[in-house]
Image: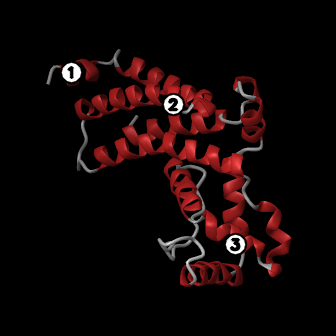
């Protein structure tokens, strides 16, 4: 299997395990993870983009907030929210990254009187904290994949060091991002499973000898 496909399987496995209640240790974050912050972010994006009127008003929220420095001295980018695609983990990363980047505008948008029907979708602080952790977790395979994708024809001998580096960083990250360590661990195990199979092939032996 190609590197991006294996990464997709491993990361999707990790993301799915985030809501596995049996693997959670801290009660406060366990409850928040059980509510599925990724799904919550997806819902916020979906309802905010549900109509042309809402999309336009969301952009107005950013522009008007920037004009009066509502979001601080640094203006928010006049960007659109991104909805992920189930089959592509990298789109989950892009969606979460954009939601966190524009969260101040999302809050202001949902507070508007004419958005009362969707105000309950506002992200809680604990969900935002977990989304920050999830973004940091997903950023690692994202960067590794970008480096390999820059190569026009990445070979097995080039991909294998990428796997090793990815695993090393994820093991360190599991200690830092303890709130989602069970999800990261599931991703690590899936990568180790593939790497173990790859090491048993003739192609692996040939790649390591080049």
Pinpoint residue 4: horizontal percent, then vertical percent: 41, 42
Q: Residue at x 57, y 66 (%)?
A: 102
Would you say 122 lies left or right of 101 here?
right
Q: Residue at x 52, y 56 (%)?
A: 97
Q: Residue at x 40, y 34 (%)?
A: 1
Residue 82 lies in quadrant: bottom right
Report the mark closest to the observer, 1 or 3. 3
Tell me the tag on residue 208. Answer: 1
Q: Earlier in the sequence, mark 3 or mark 2?
A: 3
How many marks do you count on the picture? 3
Q: CA distance from mark 1 to mark 3?
A: 55 Å
Categorize mark 2 by other alpha carbons within 10 Å: few (<14), some (14-19), many (20+).
Answer: few
Q: Quarter of the image containing the C terminus?
A: top left
Pinpoint residue 96: horizontal percent, then vertical percent: 57, 54
Would you say 126 lies left or right of 157 here?
right
Tell me the tag on residue 176. Answer: 2
Pinpoint residue 10: horizontal percent, then vertical percent: 51, 34
């Amino acid at each position: 299997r190609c590197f991006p496909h294996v990464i997709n399987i491993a990361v999707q496995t990790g993301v799915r395990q985030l809501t596995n209640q049996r693997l959670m240790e801290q009660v406060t974050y366990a409850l928040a993870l059980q509510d599925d912050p990724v799904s919550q972010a997806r819902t916020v994006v979906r309802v905010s983009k549900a109509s042309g009127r809402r999309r336009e008003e969301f952009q107005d929220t950013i522009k008007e907030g920037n004009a009066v420095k509502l979001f601080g001295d640094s203006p928010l980018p006049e960007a659109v929210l991104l909805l992920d695609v189930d089959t592509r983990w990298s789109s989950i990363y892009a969606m979460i990254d954009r939601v966190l980047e524009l969260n101040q505008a999302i809050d202001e948008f949902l507070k508007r009187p004419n958005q009362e029907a969707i105000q309950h979708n506002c992200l809680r602080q604990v969900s935002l904290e977990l989304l920050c952790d999830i973004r940091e977790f997903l950023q690692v395979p994202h960067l590794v994949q970008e480096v390999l994708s820059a190569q026009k024809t990445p070979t097995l001998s080039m991909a294998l060091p990428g796997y090793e580096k990815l695993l090393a960083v994820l093991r360190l990250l599991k200690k830092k991002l303890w709130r989602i360590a069970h999800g990261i661990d599931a991703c690590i195990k899936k990568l180790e499973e593939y790497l173990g199979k790859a090491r048993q092939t003739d192609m692996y032996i040939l790649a390591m000898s080049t």
